[in-house]
Image (tube, rainbow, N blue to C red):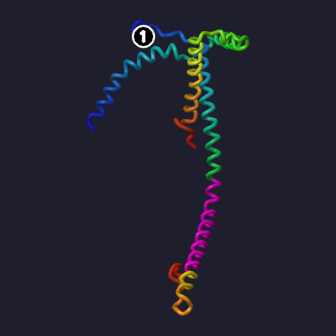
Amino acid sequence: MSSLPYGPPVRVSPLIRFGRWSFLTVGIVYGAFHQNRLSKKEERLREIEAKEKPIRDAKLAAEKALASAAEIKALEEMVNKKLGSTTLRINWHKYLLNE
Amino acid sequence: MAAIPGLINSTIAAARPKFAIFMKYAKVELAPPKLSELPQIKAGIGKLLSSAKSGAWRDLTVKQATLNTLVGAEVLFWFYIGECIGKRHLVGYDV
């Protein structure tokens, strides 16, 4: 041990070394266990998400179509009221929704 | 850009003797406990328990208590190193 620049190595108490190694081992087991558990959980959640996505997308699209139709109808009514019954009535649906 | 491999090589060359010194110390200071040290470990645990029961830990000086706390924290942090190894990711769980 003559080549060591900081003097001879400290004799660390066996209890401390035991504590370090046992905590390290417990930590590895804990980490692996929870990694396994959480990835399985996430996998299940992803499956559910994938199943529900088309349903949700369809629902959102329907809601959007409904909302835009209502908006156009309101616009139509407003404009036609302003134009009055004597002038040309414009079918806004035809222009805006390409019906 | 051409200097980078040379830089890496010189860094490795400079770090090698220091790493050898580190390994020499680590082989003694970080060695896993031997089976022959089991009685000492048992005695240490018994001492910890008896000091916790009898309240002897309150008779330490502030300096000793600080050192003991730091050593305890260091030992505890090995758990988190182990957890990072077990989950194979540094920050959080990579699910």
Residue A18, position as x, y percentages in the image: 61, 17
Magenta segment boundaries in residue numbering: A47-75
Q: Residue at x 55, y 12 (%)?
A: A12
Tell me where residue B55 sits by quadrant: top right
Q: Mark 1 = which residue?
A: A6
Q: Is residue A70 above or below residue B94?
A: below
Horizontal side of residue B95 vs B39, given as left or right: left
Locate the C terminus of chain B by quadrant. top right
Tell me where residue A30 sits by quadrant: top right
Locate the N terminus of chain B by quadrant. top left
Horizontal side of residue B82 vs A7, given as left or right: right
In the depicted view, which residue is nearer to us: A95 or B50? A95
Residue A68, position as x, y percentages in the image: 57, 73
Horizontal side of residue B15 vs B54, given as left or right: left
Which element type, helix, strand or loop, lies under badge 1? loop
In the depicted view, which residue is nearer to us: B44 or B86? B44
Horizontal side of residue B50 vs B16, given as left or right: right
Q: Residue at x 35, y 26 (%)?
A: B12
Q: Amino acid at mark 1?
A: Tyr
Q: Residue at x 59, y 30 (%)?
A: A28
Residue A31 within the segment the image draws in magenta: no
Q: Is residue A44 above or below residue A57?
A: above
Residue A61, position as x, y percentages in the image: 59, 68
Q: Residue furthest right?
A: B53
Q: Is residue B82 above or below residue A98?
A: above
Q: How many C-alpha atoms fall within 10 Å of the one at disc 1: few (<14), some, or many (≥20)?
A: few
Q: Residue at x 60, y 64 (%)?
A: A57
Residue A65 within the segment the image draws in magenta: yes
Disc 1 sits on a residue from what chain? A
Residue A13, visible in the rendered structure = no
